[in-house]
Image (cartoon, helix red, strand yellow):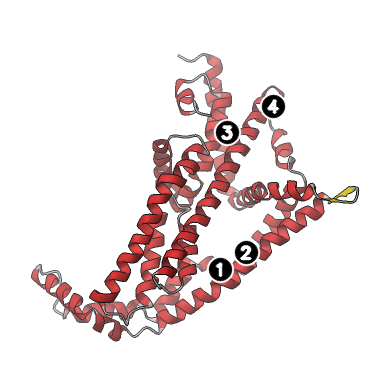
Amino acid sequence: MPNINNFWKVIIALIIVFIIWVIWHYLGSIVAYILSAAFLTMLGTPIMVMLRSVKLGKYKLPKAICAILIIAGFYTLLAFFIALFVPLIVEQFNNLSSIDIDKGLKNVESSVYQFSEFLKKYQLAGEEDPIIQIKNGIREFFNTKNLFSIFGTAFGFIGNIVSIITALFAVTFIWFFFLTDNELLYKYSSMFIPSDLEKGFDNVIGTSRNLLTRYIFGILAQLSFVTLFVTSGMWFFGVKYALLIGFFAGLANIIPYVGPVIGLSFALFVAITTNLDLQFTSEMLPLILKIGAVFALMQTLDNIFLQPIIFSNSVKAHPLEIFIIILVAGTLAGVGGMIIAIPFYTIIRVVAKEFLSEFKLVKTLTSDL
């Protein structure tokens, strides 16, 4: 039995978790702004240190100027990516709405016929000819109104310009002050910490910052690798929109485990819809297999070399731990939960080790920290 002191530690920990949940539930957007700014600060801190080391005669660049340069550089890079990828996305959307369905189906007529016979054999088709049903279904999918509905659902947040501008302004404003005073968040947080826990709080902040920084840079390295590898593979096999596919695959790969499937699905979708004039057996099927091979090789290299470094070494947790935590987070909070699961779990482990190290479970889960 744990002593009364440990009992109250557990009670306090549960109360803190409940308070965090309430704050996130009612003030989620504000918390998201602060967390986004903190994330960008972690990325910008090394650049800040480098800029501060630059001297103009006897003087260093002021922190405010360094912060402005970093923020301006970030938005310049963001504008570059928007200018690069948005036209590709719009062009692909226009291509989808003008696809000649009959011409494409003619090239796969043999396969469609075999599929039709399969449906008839097992009585899975209605009275209408399955080929006509398939054609009508594909036409309906590529109907312009449906495409607008699909893209509108996926990217509906883009339409809310006011919210986006508000979020960008809020994040940028907070980010600026975090860069100019990297202890600002710590100062405000420490106001709520009792004096006798300040040392432990300092250890939590230091360890969490170190682990999360390593994790973030690991994720960026993974994104860059996947983007470069997939883009090169698509370009080598002559797939259109290779850069768009590669960049999307890199972003999707941030979602643990299911990201590569999403990236592959997108690649196949783009490749098939932009090559409906190809003969299915002799040209389309080999192209599909080549795309699958690129993603399979990429995922193999990612699993063997990158993920052990990012998901295990950077946050110092066992791969099975990480897998279970991601599954739980995905069940409770969907894709968003899967993305933030590892950073959130890392912070919890650091806090538990610092303040609840008497418990055997905590000792086991934090032995590598």
Q: CA distance from mark 3 to mark 4?
A: 16 Å
Residue at the image point whose x is 39% and y is 77% from the top: 146
Task: Give amino acid for label 1.
Answer: Ile
Q: CA distance from mark 1 to mark 3?
A: 35 Å
Q: Nearer the viewer, mark 1 or mark 3?
A: 1
Task: List x then y, in percent, for residue 102.
Answer: 28, 85
Label 3 Cα neighbours within 10 Å, binned few <14 / some 14-19 / many ≥20: few
Res. 158 mark: 1
Q: CA distance from mark 2 to mark 1?
A: 8 Å
Q: CA distance from mark 2 to mark 4?
A: 37 Å
Res. 16 mark: 3
Q: Earlier in the sequence, mark 3 or mark 2?
A: 3
The quarter of the image holding the N terminus is top left
Q: Nearer the viewer, mark 3 or mark 4?
A: 4
Q: Out of 47 and 175, give the one closest to the viewer.
A: 47
Q: Earlier in the sequence, mark 2 or mark 4?
A: 2
The answer to whether residue 257 is visible is no
Q: Out of 323 and 162, give the one closest to the viewer.
A: 323
Task: Give amino acid for label 4.
Answer: Glu
